[in-house]
Every structure is written in structure tokens, then in C-alpha cells.
Image: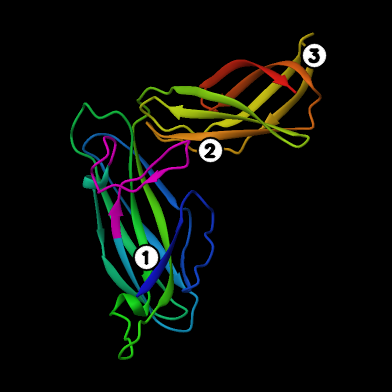
Amino acid sequence: MATTLIAFILGALPFSASAATGITVLGELTREATLEPGEQHEGRIVLSNGSDHAQEVRVYQSDYLFYADGRNVYGDPGSSPRSNARWVTFTPRQLTVAPGDTAAIYYKIQVPADKALVGTYWSMLMVEPLGPSDLGPLEAEPGKVKMGLRTVMRYGVQITTHIGNAGTRDLRFSNLRLVVDGTDRVVQVDVEDVGQAWLNPTFWVEVRNREGELVGRFEAAKTRLYPNCSTCCRFELGQLSSGAYNALIVADNEDDNVFGAQCTLDIP
């Protein structure tokens, strides 16, 4: 019996970390193109093998949604309303990367000639190095159970298509809560992209006392949001004194779209 430990590397990193197998995806893990209906775009994903042995890699598609409660949903390609998986073709589906060498996966996005398309569409190309146990079952001695642990590092490369600059941009704030951890105070709020286009806002909260004096401005991690997806923003307030405060939560998308929500905080 074999146990598989799976880890995903997702996001938009300038240079991804090396997997234990030696396979590395070079460049950013989000590939985006702005296209009009009927247009196409071609690109490539370069893999590097830093190990001393040849490495087999398989490539397949998946949809991808994420939510503020921590869920990540990898659905069948084309199952999400804003999936572009059916627009994407790629080759090869399996390849061998020689030791110390690089190889490329080539992909093409063909946007349908549908004038009703608007906003952002996306899916993922999953890049998975194959270990020896992928090529056959573990051999067990007679009368004994064979057990093994295999770590699989899968890279998720997001293939993102923006239809022009069209599409509504809108955010919804919900489930505001204050978490007290010893003397530290943390404000958490769920943020959902309820528009048609992706957002890449900078988040901060301005806290003022009841006299209107600014107590501090506290930032949260910058987070990219796709339509119908959500995230939990955390603002670490530190050792803010007990009392009542007014707070303004701001999401600045840096494209003339700024969103905000006002709330009150009662610090115990």
C-alpha cells in the first residue's frame, strides 16, 4: 500500500521553488493575455530539471476556484462558468526532461468569436513530475504488506484570459470579526470578487479613535481575486489599546477602482 502526499504550488511567483524531484517551472505561475473575441495567443511554459537523472512529467488541465474558508476546488476542465479550458490546447501531454536541461510545454488560447464574452476567464495547466511508483505498483514480499510514502509536487500554472478591458469590477466584504490572541489584535474580513473581471487590490485598514484621530494604518497581504472567488484578509493591529474605534477597510485596485467598508471595533 502506498501513501501519496500531494503539494500544490500556485500563484504568481517570479521564480518558483525547486521541487524535490528537481523539476522547476521557470517564470511566473500565472500567464495572462488580453484578447478580443476570435483572437488567439500562444505561449510556452519552460521546465528545468536540476537533478542528475532524467525526469518524466505529465501535463493536464483543471479548473480552479478558491474561497475564504480555505477551500480550493480543482474541477473538471470546463466545468466552471468562467473556465477557458476549452479554449486552451497544449502539447506535449507528457515529456522527458534530461538532467540539467530544459524543455517546454507549448499552449495556445483561441477565444471563441462570441461578442457576449466579457471579463476574465481562466483555468490551469497542472505540471506533475512522475516518480518511479507512477510507472508500476510496489512489489510486496509474499505474506507481507508493502508500504511507501511518495511526495508529489504539482505546479499549477494559471492560464488567464481577459476579454479586452470590459467587465464589471466589484467587491463584497462580509463576515468581519476581531480575533484576540493574547495582547495581539487581528481583524479578519472575507472579500469576494462579485464582478466579471479579476482584481489585484492592495488592502489596508485605517483605524481612528472616537475623536477621529488616526491611530494607525494596517496592511494585509496583496491578493489576486478571480470572479466568484473569495479570500480572507487579515489585518494585524498589534497591541492596540482597549476601547472603541472606527475603521475603514480599503481595497485599492490601482485602476481607478477603490472599494471600502466602514465598521466599528470594540477592543477588549
Distance CA(mark 2)–CA(mark 3): 29 Å
Between 176 and 222, the residue placed more toward the observer is 176
Query: Residue 13 got which mark?
Result: none
Q: Quadrant of residue 96?
A: bottom left
Q: Amino acid at mark 1?
A: Glu
Distance CA(mark 1)–CA(mark 3): 53 Å
Task: Name the side, left or right, on which 109 lies relative to 149.
Answer: left
User: Mark 1 or mark 2: which comes first in sequence?
Assistant: 1
Residue named by callout 3: 213
Render colour scheme: rainbow
- The span shown in magenta is 60-83
Residue named by callout 1: 128
x and y, in percent, of residue 113 in the image: 18, 35
Q: Is residue 72 magenta?
A: yes
Against 45, is 134 above or below? below
| Label 3 secondary element | loop
Q: Is residue 51 magenta?
A: no
Residue named by callout 2: 223
Q: Amino acid at mark 2?
A: Thr
Distance CA(mark 1)–CA(mark 2): 25 Å
Q: Main secondary structure of the magenta part?
A: loop
